[in-house]
């Protein structure tokens, strides 16, 4: 059932564009699952895929984390976001 306090086997701090995140890994049924928490807006996410290793779970969590970052905390440069770079 729902885990209120899953036991994290590993956690790491990540910072992108001034926004701090924490990536956490926990044991799942047959491997490891990655989750992340955003200290910028207190959003949380978790990967649905089960990974064989903590490293893989971390990578997958960071992919999910990055999608959130782009969506919510994308660079807010003053001025228009031009197309051609
Ligand atoms: Zn956020």
Image (tube, helix red, strand yellow):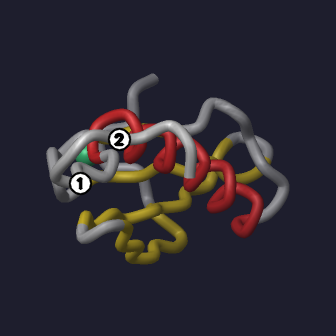
- Res. 16 image quadrant: bottom left
- Give me the disc on residue 77: 1
- Give me the disc on residue 46: none
User: What is the spatial separation of the Cα atoms under label 2 and label 1, in whole angstroms?
Assistant: 8 Å
44 on left or right of 47: left
Estimate the x, y position of residue 84 in percent, counting from the top left: 56, 43
CB atoms of marks 2 and 1 within 8 Å:
yes
At mark 2, the secondary structure is loop
Q: Residues within 10 Å of mark 2 (few under 14, many from 20)?
A: few
Ligand 1: image quarter: top left
Ligand 1 within 8 A of label 2's CB?
A: no
Residue beneath disc 2 = 81
14 on left or right of 52: left
Comparing 75 with 48, the one in front is 75
Comparing 65 with 18, the one in front is 18
Estimate the x, y position of residue 4 in percent, counting from the top left: 29, 39
Estimate the x, y position of residue 43 in percent, counting from the top left: 25, 40
Estimate the x, y position of residue 38 in percent, counting from the top left: 27, 53
Comparing 69 with 6, the one in front is 69
Residue at (45%, 23%) from the top-left corner?
1
């Amino acid at each position: 059932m729902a885990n209120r306090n899953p036991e994290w086997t590993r956690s790491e701090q990540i910072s992108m564009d001034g926004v701090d995140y924490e990536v956490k890994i926990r044991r799942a049924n047959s491997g490891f699952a990655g989750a992340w928490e955003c200290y910028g807006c207190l959003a949380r996410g978790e990967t649905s895929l089960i990974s064989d290793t903590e490293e893989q779970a971390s990578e997958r969590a960071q992919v999910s984390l990055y999608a959130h970052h782009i969506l919510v905390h994308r660079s807010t440069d003053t001025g228009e976001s031009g197309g051609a770079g």
